[in-house]
Amino acid sequence: MARPILVVTTRDWVECVKRNLDRVDIYQFPKPRKRTPLAKPGSIAIIIAHNPREPRGSWSIIGEFKVTSVRYVSREEYEELKRSGRVCEPPLPKYGSGGKVAVIGFEDLRIYPKEVKLSELCDVKTASASKPLCEWKIKGETLVDEQLVEGIRRKVYAGTGEHGVRGDLAEKIAELEKRLLSFIESLLGLSGSTEMFQTHECIERVLLELGKALGFRTYTADQSRKCGDVKLEKFADLVQSDLPLAEKLKNIDVIWHGQDVYYLFEVVLESDMEKALLRFVKASELNARYYIVSDDKESFDKAINNKAFERIRDRTSFISLNELKRDYYITKLWRTNIDKLKLPYLS
């Protein structure tokens, strides 16, 4: 399991991130690294912010994020990350001797409800440390343990009426969600239906069923293909001639249509992420939202920031297979209970 870390940054970086929470997902080091970064995918990073020439005791714990990737990028790659809005540039960024800069990709950024200064953390330390955090000399990255992380969280959430859901508690919640979905599976008679989320055709079927359950008209480019013994045409009520820009839309995996808005889905399991996105670009003049359904978030993040996809970037979202499974089961359960009302727009 990846160990948690402390990372030190500037107040300017923190303010920039707060203004761009929906875009920024890269933390970068302002100076060349002389060693491999300590962060690993899965690490929880506690953010310490400071102003230049500020005494160390005034440095503040302001939030945390979860590390998704750690890599070195060239000057050109870094400039592209900046242009895409994914980076809040540190003061005086420098490149190492190889022209590279270390960057950390992250998700689940959380700004704490209140800041806590290092001078207030004299009762927080790791299990193996002899000195408390308030006496540490912290530079760049510092490895810590869960005991210190939980001690910090108790401080930042004390008296706020909130609590930080991480670590063991987060794992318990994930397990509870898994058990709840399993229970819903049994209620719907879907227990053991693992194939529904493993093959391209069956994921298309899930999307078609989900769209119809939500009241949309549906289309698939693969109507003659089967999920199990059932052809996908059973779940689609639109054909190619019903589509605007038919030549540009005919190969889209799944389309939902309702109230003059289209929702386009491409399933990417082992296929090319960029080819899927290019199909969206061809239909970019349409009033539409675009979705990639896949478990390869890293490839999606890399591809969507390519300049070729600038026109669709703000309208394109990523859906993991676990998210799709959750949405499918919950929607099916909802429809099972709501159908008795015979609502006309959910026929």
Image (cartoon, grey):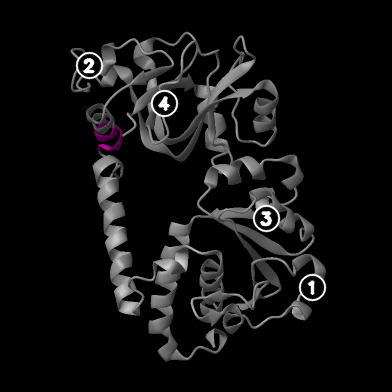
Quote the CA–CA distance across marks 3 and 4: 32 Å
Instruction: In this rendered view, identify the residue nearer to me: 337 or 244.
Output: 244
Mark sitting on residue 77: none
Whichever of callouts 1 and 4 sits on the residue coming sooner in the sequence is 4
Helix, strand or loop at mark 4 = loop
Q: Disc 3 designates what residue?
A: 276
Seen in the picture, residue 218 relative to 111 is either above or below; the reply is below
Seen in the picture, residue 315 relative to 68 is either above or below; the reply is below
Q: Is label 3 or label 1 in front?
A: 3
Q: Position of residue 119 (x, y in %)?
A: 29, 17
Q: Which residues are magenta?
A: 153-158
Quote the CA–CA distance across marks 1 and 2: 65 Å
Q: Disc 2 designates what residue?
A: 132
Quote the CA–CA distance across marks 3 and 1: 19 Å
Decide if residue 340 is on the left or right side of residue 156: right
Question: Crowding at label 2, few (<14), some or many (≥20) Cα neighbours within 10 Å?
Answer: some
Instruction: In this rendered view, identify the residue nearer to me: 179 or 194.
Output: 194
Residue at 78% across / 58% down in the picture? 282
Whichever of callouts 2 and 4 sits on the residue coming sooner in the sequence is 4
Helix, strand or loop at mark 2 = loop
Whichever of callouts 3 and 4 sits on the residue coming sooner in the sequence is 4
Which kind of residue does numbered mark 1 sit on?
A: Pro
Which kind of residue does numbered mark 4 sit on?
A: Ala
Quote the CA–CA distance across marks 2 and 4: 22 Å
Q: Disc 1 designates what residue?
A: 244
Whichever of callouts 1 and 2 sits on the residue coming sooner in the sequence is 2
Residue at 52% across / 76% down in the picture? 209
Residue at 34% across / 32% down in the picture? 2
Q: Disc 4 designates what residue?
A: 39
Whichever of callouts 3 and 2 sits on the residue coming sooner in the sequence is 2
Q: Is label 1 or label 2 in front?
A: 1
Q: Position of residue 265 (x, y in %)?
A: 62, 63
